[in-house]
Amino acid sequence: MDIQLDPARDDLPLMANTSHILVKHYVLDLDVDFESQVIEGTIVLFLEDGNRFKKQNSSIEEACQSESNKACKFGMPEPCHISVTNARTFSSEMDYNDFAICSKGEKDTPDKDGNHDNQEHASGISSSKYCCDTGNRGSEDFVLVLDCCDLSVLKVEEVDVAAVPGMEKFTRSPKLTVVSEELRNQIVRELVTLPADCWREQLDYYACCSQAPGCGELLFDTDSWSLQIRKTGAQTATDFPHAIRIWYKTKPEGRSVTWTSDQSDRPCVYTVGSPINNRALFPCQEPPVAMSTWQATVRAAASYVVLMSGENFAKPTQLWEGCSSWYYYVTMPMPASTFTIAVGCWTEMKLETCSSNDLATERPLSPSEADFRHVGVCSHMEYPCRFQNASAAAQEIIPYRVFAPVCLKGACQETLLRLIPPCLSAAHSVLGTHPFSRLDVLIVPANFPSLGMASPHIMFLSQSILTGRSHLCGTRLCHEIAHAWFGLAIGARDWTEEWLSEGFATHLEDVFWAAAQQLDPREAREQQELRACLRWRRLQDEMRCSPEEMQVLRPSKDKTGHTSNSGASVIKQGLNPEKIFMQVHYLKGYFLLRFLAKRFGDETYFSFLRKFVHTFHGQLILSQDFLQMLLENIPEEKRLELSVENIYQDWLESSGIPKPLQRERRAEAECGLARQVRAEVTKWIQVNRRPRKRKRRVKEEVFEKF
């Protein structure tokens, strides 16, 4: 690996060699054991080697002409198939910066098994030696590197997909008389590239292949952050088996999995995705670039409910007395870090009474249909996309369920259940098509370290938001709903650019909440200015009390999005315990977007935002993708008004600071956020005024201080 990774540092290592080979689909088959506090079973990975997806990426970039300077080239390096997403920043959107009052409920039990490293065969494998493999190093074998932490890996084997009936259709031979590695890999390559309209058939084949027998164990080794797998004689990613099965189990102390008790003192488990994402739940490729789909079968005692990131409202299937099985799937490609699971004795909550004081559920605003539907084919990889579905585009309120311990039924009835429809409708009125087809909302146990977390198809909310009046619950709900677009459907290509999810969600929560309440413009403005003033004071406190290097929106600066030749990278400050308390990405991002909305006007700004969502959904972006498209799409007169002379005062006034305090705050504002915003937007104006042939020259300099 090009980058020397030291797990003792604050930077979180992403070890997977995604430049050589990508996981396209995961099939999980798991059992949840509350007595031992272990999740165990198998995971089958369907892979595609780098040569194929690089060719696909090259052809897509040539064909794609987007609104944002060939926007598709900032998306995934491969037009792949599917899974459930973002990102914060495609990682599950855990909002650590609005902390709930928590009580400790989990147990820490030492692991008794440790890692089984297949020492008999693999004692000679060195992780440092093989992680840096480029795909073909003479006589050395290719090594698949997966992100893995706090897991006991028991066995790794190749899957004989050719043994599944009907696989002949994916080969050039009517009968599979001679089965070779090349033939099995050809079957997987054809399977993962089935067109989007064959998604049901594809899922069925994935399920059948995952049950196929093994055809040989693979050598493997583990270290603190990764699992390395090799097959003797397979010297390149093309030669490496494209379907492998891993037998593993989690550890009770695993940092991605929280074993605890709910508010009714019943045992439960949930995953929070941070600080090390999902590598302590299953071996995977953590970098955002590894977009994949998945399906999962989870077994637990019959009294438990299993909730997961999945497109279907799963129902339990009784296997035998006292045991049930739950099945979920996704067809939208997303990073593995967005996968979320929760198992507990939850009760589905339903609204039993109606009140005239309920917030209205009809659409608060009525923008034209043209604002929601844009001409042209989506720029992302192929999958069944809701943005190209007319009925989905018109769906203001997606189907939803609410789960909580039975002791919280009254609180859910009083606030949460009444707020979900108007908040979903308000979000649709502002941004258009909901990226996901359904939503589960879970009130998580008291030890949950935040007010909320958004994942594809499922949202975690703290019990703290159920107390008091509806304002706290409504704003938090709107914040997490906003993450469906920003953070999940559109994620950051570099996880250090968290403002692309948190800044947008913080800004949009005010807009959604005002629409959900159906406030008139004056009331909405007063409410938003008050919240802006409070956020400004909070940001000032943070900037005074936090290290300067942790206040930068792009800590990697000119190396933002950089990976080693293998695809490995690090997340700056990713393991720093102070990081989860920081609000810099929420607040600086919020004030930047608030400034832009105020300067351009709501009609221009939100019309652009809907166009931006349509252009980039299903993709990963960097900061320059957003700002470049913004300045290329706003009216010329608006762009010219953003002169060096007035930009600072405009930002200061739109920040929400009461006018009597503006002069007093000018000096303080200049030494931080205002200086950054002024420098960046000014530079973008200068870039866009230059002849097109000169823009490229200065493009990389634009975000030096961002």
Image (cartoon, helix red, strand yellow):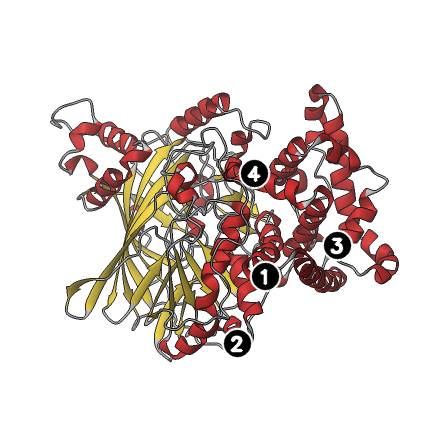
Q: Can residue 505 be seen in this view?
A: yes
* Quadrant position of residue 298: bottom left
Q: Is residue 321 above or below residue 580?
A: below
Residue 532 place in picture, x, y as percent: 70, 60
**Residue that mark 2 sits on:** 467
Disc 4 crowd rating (10 Å Cα; few below 14, some 14-19, many 20+) is: many
Q: In this view, does 399 lie above or below 389?
A: below
The answer to whether residue 672 is seen in the rendering is no
Identity, as a three-letter code, of the amino acid under mark 3? Ser
In-front residue for pair 70/519 = 519
- Are discs 1 and 2 less than 8 Å apart at CB? no
Q: How far apart are marks 1 and 2 (CA)?
A: 24 Å
The span from disc 1 to disc 4 (Cα, nearest Å) is 29 Å
Residue that badge 1 annotates: 580
Amino acid at the residue labelled 1: Ile
Q: Is residue 94 above or below residue 74?
A: below
Asked if residue 575 lies left or right of residue 441, the reply is right
- Extreme residue in the front direction: 356
